[in-house]
Amino acid sequence: MNRPTQWAWPLMLALAALNAPQVQARNLSCPAPLLAMTYNIRLDTPADGENSWAHRRDFVIGQILVLRPAILGMQEVLPNQRADLTAVLTGYDFVGGGRDDGAVAGEASPIAVDRRLFRITASGTFWLSPTPEVPSLGWDAAYRRIASWVRLERRRDRARLLAINTHWDHEGQLARENSGLMLAEWIAANRQPGEEVLLMGDFNTTVSDIAIRALLTEATGLQDTREAAAMGSSGPAFSFNGFAPMPMNGALIDHLFASSGMRVIKHMVMAEHANGRAASDHFPVVALLDLSAEGQPHCRE
């Protein structure tokens, strides 16, 4: 017997959170909260058999279309997968190059931005290595690893946001630790006055790891959205599922970190499965955030 989809309840909770009276703007001039999403969609490889991209592409894209995140960071995106995504997600602008050349080749960690809400003012990609400007392998990493970034201005009120999406190495602990230090330094050096920060991705480790703790400092001003969420976190306490639709346990290795100037309303691991299948070997993770422009203190109450 086919299992019914299990994400209807989390989705309704997310939509309820968005519409709940306690998170509605006190003034109609205040923009609505924005939904940020990080999603390792799993690369396209025939080795996955019945879980290969051709069998789950519509499932992944359907999740994105229904949730309609304002900002979406994805990992393990190969060129053909990016083509599939951009063909359907026509309301989004995509930024971020592949890890093999910074343009097209290899896995990418792109950021998709809802163009109705934001205008892109700058973007780029760098490598998590001692030579971040060129394609390179960092420390004890098994693969080249990158971070993509985009500088945004919200159309409605000119609120500014620096969003970064990354995918850390799954084997090299030294690589993860240095990636954390490098990103912390990069954020401190590149964040502009009055600009909020959103860092998302597959970090291949939990928030208790020293590599993550290096990010959550006064210098970066970042907070873990799961810990900071005013309405708490829903869904399982893990994001990697290995294509198991109902795993019994695991680790939360996909994260969203937001600067303290943004109020975190809700955090959720979207553990959807349908007909005994998961859309990826990771569940997407979302956070509902309140981004208010300078000069609108009433929006932060």
Image (spheres, rainbow, N blue to C red):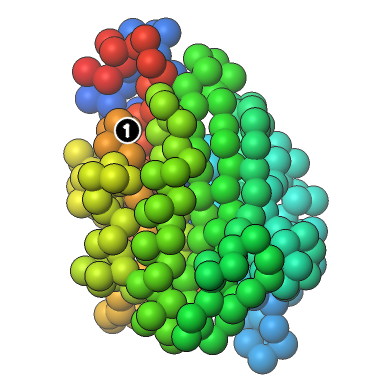
Left or right of 20? Residue 64 is right
Residue at 25% in and 72% down: 209
Residue 285: image location, x then y, percent = 41, 57
Residue at 25% in and 62% down: 213
Tell me the SS state at disc 1. Answer: loop
Say which amino acid is labelled 1: Met
Q: Quadrant of the C terminus?
A: top left
Left or right of 45? Residue 33 is left
Residue underneath mark 1? 262
Between 129 and 81, the residue placed more toward the observer is: 129
Left or right of 209? Residue 83 is right
Residue 234: image location, x then y, percent = 27, 54
Residue 244: image location, x then y, percent = 44, 81
Q: Is residue 214 visible?
A: yes
Question: For residue 202, which quarter of the picture?
Answer: bottom left
Q: Is residue 273 visible?
A: no
